[in-house]
Amino acid sequence: MAASATPLPRLVERGSAGDALSLGFVTAFLSVVVCLPIAALVWASTGGAFWTAVSSAEAVAALKLTLAVAAAAALVNAVLGTITAWVLVRDEFRGKSVVDAVIDLPFALPTIVAGLVLLALYGPHSPVGVNIAFTRTAIFLALLFVTLPFVVRTVQPVLRELDTEMEDAARSLGAADRTVFRRIVLPTILPGILSGVTLAFARAVGEIGALVIISGNLPYKTEVASVFVFNRIQTGDRAGAAAVAVVLLAISFAVLLAVGGLRRLATRHERA
Amino acid sequence: MRKVGLRVVALGYLGLVLVGPLTMVFWRTFEHGFGTFWSTLSEPNTVHAFELTLLVAAIAVPLNTVFGIVCALAIVRRRFPGKGIVNAFVDLPLALSPVVVGLSLFLLYGRGGWFYGFFTGHGVQILFALPSMVLATVFVSLPFVAREVVPTLREIGEEQEQAAHTLGASGWQTFWRVTLPSIRWAVIYGVVLTTARCLGEYGAVAVVSGRIEGKTETATLRVQDQYENFNLAGAYGISLALAAIAVCVLVAMTMLRPREGAPA
């Protein structure tokens, strides 16, 4: 509530020296750590070779594959993540708090370990007899793993605050469960789902650690964009690496813009 | 009935994607007994990899903690031109591929880069050495403290800080006595997330470190190295050690989360 209230008038003018110091620190730190490297990347990509590099058959194949599989993983997690969030908020069962904690595992587990772990279960020595190593299915599965928490964690708090009274009222007036979900629950949690999905998508597009081991990195088949960039750096093709990297950078900025817009959309009632 | 169905769907999905694979690593690691596990972990290059990982985290986490707090205070409590840009750049690492981060540093400090001449002239090695690995790790773990502290600062409001001010406290005193105690859980939660990200970083460090065994190889790079050299036992052993750290992080996150929403 304090966020939306108008700030109180300043009783005492704060020390402007401290202000300048902290702003200077933030700016300097951000410049050295983030802005300068990004500027160097954009600069390196602006040679005449950009279009040639980005439209090379292998780069196009890698980008297409990345976008398609990332979108698929994000969408599957939109549905299953919403169901998981719903179960965690509305359902009661033994061990729920453990399940709730396990959701964050992909955030805590190093991604390279995630890749190895998936290979152990769904690879050539699989104890369950499923071998999807070095296929696109493996990429899809690895991306499902790393993006699993996003939708759950953006939908869960909204669902928790959602009053069941409205749903009860709708039901008592004869609405079916499906209608209640579509007309009452979904509109409230939709901004949460969408911002979770966009973040998951961005994460999936940029993922490398979970993929280097399990995807096999075959050009035109299982080589995703970040692995493409990595391989081009290794072979010394800076222009090719920088070109695809700039495309990934543009996607990241677009995603952040979209999430910012969704956040404003979600809080429009509070601010009004 | 529908409730049970949804529960089965959710738990089945989590089992297939999360829990199943993780149990596999335990099984694979201890398949050949505890002795094998221990000997892979005590191998000198592996020990060095873990030491290096901890060293990088020990530098990156404090830097990002200080930055995160100062940045959050600036974003919430101050008005300044370019705030939107600062916000965007703080969030960028959440949405950007670590490989792109690594490549950016590579282009800035590598041969032909803007800073290449300056640092080689002074005999300082940035790429394929600790400095670039720290820079890469700081970049990818930048947002966590700031993102946790910002909402908490908004929630607690400015009244207490202003009261301290009118009673004659300096800005520094206000920060240590009033602001920091009320945001401490958010800071700790952010530090836990930052540490987890630093220990698990792979993509950015893989690009800038050169992956030199026994020199610039971190624990995550060591996993890949062992895997590529067909030493699966080694790869699983290191993975399990990293997974154990991840579980500790999970426990810490779970214990800290309820306090977040508690009234300050």
Image (spheres, coloured by chain):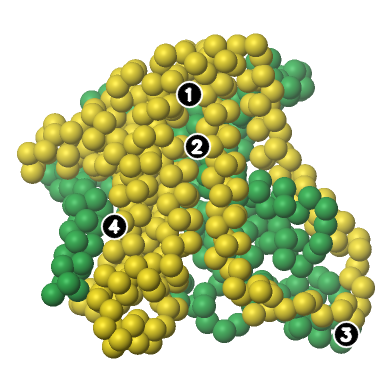
Chain colours: A yellow, B green
Marks 4 and 2: which is nearer the front?
Answer: 4
Which quarter shows the N terminus of chain B?
bottom left
Q: Which residue is mark 4?
A: A80
Count the marks: how many? 4
> Disc 2 to disc 1, how far (Cα)?
10 Å
User: Residue B118: x and y, percent?
Assistant: 77, 22
Which residue extends farthest front?
A174
Q: Are marks 4 and 1 on the same chain?
A: yes
- The circle on residue B97 is 2
CB within 8 Å, label 3 to label 4: no
Marks 4 and 1: which is nearer the front?
Answer: 4
> Disc 3 to disc 1, how far (Cα)?
56 Å
CB within 8 Å, label 2 to label 1: yes
Q: Is residue B186 visible?
A: yes
Q: Which residue is mark 3?
A: B166
Circle 4: residue type:
Leu
